[in-house]
Image (cartoon, rainbow, N blue to C red):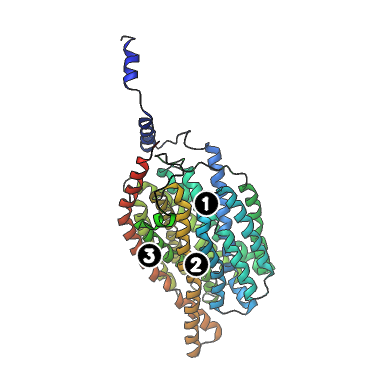
Amino acid sequence: MKRSDTPEVDSQRRPTNGDNACQIACSIRAAGVQSDLMQPARSRLVFTLLVLLGINTMNFFDRQVLGAVGEPVRQALGLDDTRLGWLGTAFILLYAIVGIPLGHWADTGRRTRILAVGVILWSGLTALSALAWDFWSLFVMRLGVGVGEASCAPAANSLVGDLVPPHRRARAIAIFMLGLPLGLGLSFIVSGYVAQHWGWQTAFLVASVPGFVLGVIAFFLQEPTRGAAEMHTVGAARRPGSRLRIVLGIPTMWWIIASGALHNFNMYAIGYFLSPLLQRYHGLSTSEAGAISGVVYGCVGALGIFLGGWACDWLAARRPSGRLEVATLALAISVPCFYFALEQPPGSVTAFAVWMQPGCMLLYFYYAGVYATIQDIVEPALRGTAMGVYFFAMYLLGGALGPVITGRISDHFARRAAEAGASDTAARAAGLHDAMYLVPVLGAALCVVLFVASRTLRADQRRLQEWMAQRPT
């Protein structure tokens, strides 16, 4: 071989900057290897994800305390199910409303600082909930908790999008969203036990402590560069037009928003009334109902999120709509599970739990599939806004209505049972049991909405990738 040939060949094949970007992107796709230039150090990434997991765990722990101690709170404050449902809705009202401006702030500000302030705020107001003396005082405290917790989802999801490349994003979001079932499950178990032995006020105080610690730690997290994990370098650039117009101009977002409203309706209806249902209809104590609710609704959900994240990434590598298709199939299977759980007679706790566990586990597939899909159709500079808009509808139309409408339907059926001659205790048990049939009905509607979203996804994803590819590097 002639030495003189080597420089000549090298000079002819010297890659351009655009070629280098393409080669890096292709190597990431083909080999699934994270570039050190694009990703933070592995240890820092793991630490950040664990802190975000802890914050999200307390996010759902604190909001679920009221569901875990709902029956003693109702008895202590003399509430009916409608007013008990409104206490759950109080949290959601401001959560939904402030979500959009906080989403915009997450797109422009320092996200780690937003998280730190938010978690300290909601932890303080959770502690103050222990001082509530009537319906309205507790209602106001729950409003404040909603403001603090609204900071979590837009900022944290935007951080995950910039920490992890697209082909691994559903699994990273699944780790973050493990906080949902862990928080709910631990809240039911711990809060139910504490309320049984030391009163419901102490349960609120216990729930507030870990959040203060996590809030301090969040101040020291490193802020990643926006768009650092994308295959095309876009940074903080976005498509022309107003933020809301761009997000709402994506057809798949409308179907995802509708799915969020339906899904959250069911999640909050179950979250706030599962423990009271076990106490009234199946005759369990507050502690027993909390333990079973924690396992059925919370802890097994961790398995659902883990399996959902893996399945969504696996199928998405083969089909662009794979994540939404996995979520649709899982939710379709959950519908008959909920129906047969409700068909069990009073006192059949084991049979009820056997059907309820897989139903609740499959609900959690939704998060890994849908949250990762939002990242796939929205550019990095708008992901906080997209999550804010999504959460606005998800909570205002779903989470806020779930406890109230379920509670109102429960009161309606309870009055009918009382008019038929049932005792107050039996009437309240029958009313709540009949109201919970709303869950499988809305679950079937949710499957239809998600399936339609999976059909519009491919075009929206292609439009975003084409725009990103045309950005100058």
- Name which quarter of the figure residue 390 lies in: bottom left
List the residue tagged with mark 2: 268
Q: Nearer the viewer, mark 3 or mark 1?
A: 1
Q: Is the residue marked by circle 3 packed among few (<14), some (14-19), or many (20+) residues within 10 Å? A: many
User: Tag 3's secondary structure?
Assistant: helix
Quadrant location, the C terminus: top left
On the image, the x and y values in percent for residue 320 come to 33, 49
Q: Can residue 186 be spotted in the picture?
A: no
- Please give the name of the residue rendered at 39% of the width and 39% of the height, measured from the top-left corner: 232
77 is higher (above) or lower (below) than 173:
below
On the image, the x and y values in percent for residue 227 come to 45, 43
99 is higher (above) or lower (below) than 9:
below
Task: Give the amino acid type for the residue marked by disc 2 in the picture.
Answer: Tyr
List the residue tagged with mark 1: 106
From the viewer's side, name the closer residue of 405 and 327: 405
List the residue tagged with mark 3: 446
Task: Give the amino acid type for the residue marked by disc 1 in the picture.
Answer: Ala
